[in-house]
Amino acid sequence: MTLQPTTPDALLARVQQSPQLLLILDAGLEPELEAIVRKLDHRIWHAWVYSHTEYASQHRDGPLLIQARSDSPLLQAFMQPWVRLHWGGLLLSDQSFNTVLEHLRSQRHALLPDGTQPLLRLHEPRALRGMVRDMDSLELDTLLGPVDHWYWCEWNEGKGDWYSVGHSMPGRGQAANGPLRLSATHLHSLQAQQTQYRNMQFVRRLLASGIAALDGIDEATMLTYVQKHTEDAFSRGFENNEDMLGFLDVYFRYHEQLFEKQSALARIMGDLKTPAWRRLLRAHALMEGITA
């Protein structure tokens, strides 16, 4: 099964058909993670993915694999407060806990085209979609191994976007015995996903900022505008995320003034000799003075 958008209701329905669930959560984002999950459900079984590896001395800063019953309070915690924190994902598998654990340990590294093997953070929700979206069925089955279904949520500016991937032959996947091979295409997709996540962040911030010209515009349409004008922003020296968002805010908030003849605002924004942050300060000072 290829990458699919999903919903919390669909996830719940799937989990209810399974006697158990697995969570993979990042203790690097919450030092007290082990204590938190034990407090919620003392019946769990868990293990650190990086223990018994070359990262054993720092294993408590890495991912924790947790096995729980499908009625565990951990499920609601994962789907409600934790989803905003990007701690990880939910896995379903008919195979043993140890089989899934060894699979994840084997894929702790990626094998890149240049032969290097960096640490692979499959449990990072903001990266997983970019990694899998251009994989064919065989590549995806290799990544999943004994995992039948993998669910996660990308939380972005107050909204959660849920996704899932599934093995083409549930129950028959094989655990990996080495790093996950990533091609140049996979790396490009991962980079594109990071850009898309940033752009959607811009979209939601701009639509929530009270800009009159954006009233009634939906997210999909706004995303096309943002994709176009972030490229323009970069070409004008607005290179980091904060400056890009500032450029977009000025562009949409003061669009008419930007394109007036002999526009003072356009001169300020187009002054490439002045740092981007200073141009934004001057632009807002100008417009606030005009509207005061």
Image (spheres, rainbow, N blue to C red):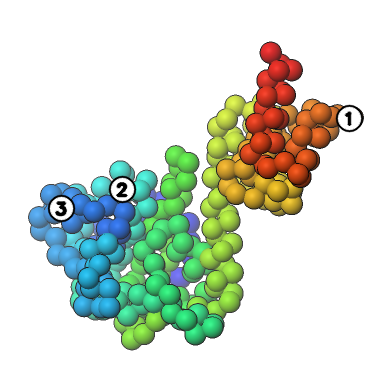
Residue 159 in the figure: left or right of residue 59: right
Q: Secondary structure at mark 2?
A: helix
Q: CA distance from mark 3 to mark 2?
A: 15 Å
Res 27 → quadrant: bottom left
> Which label sits in the foreground, 3 or 2?
3
Res 1 → quadrant: bottom left
The residue under the point 60% across, 26% down is 210
Task: Identify the amino acid type marked 2.
Answer: Trp
27 or 220, nearer to the observer: 27
Task: Tell me where residue 266 appears, x and y as whole percent.
Answer: 80, 34
| Neighbourhood count class around disc 3 (C-alpha, 10 Å): few under 14, some 14–19, many 20 upward | few
Residue bearing mark 3: 35
Residue bearing mark 2: 82
> Which label sits in the foreground, 2 or 1?
1
Task: Identify the amino acid type marked 3.
Answer: Ala
Q: What is the number of the mark on residue 262?
A: 1
Q: Earlier in the sequence, mark 2 or mark 1?
A: 2
The residue under the point 89% across, 30% down is 262
Whether pointer 2 and pointer 1 mark residues with C-beta atoms closer than 8 Å, the reply is no
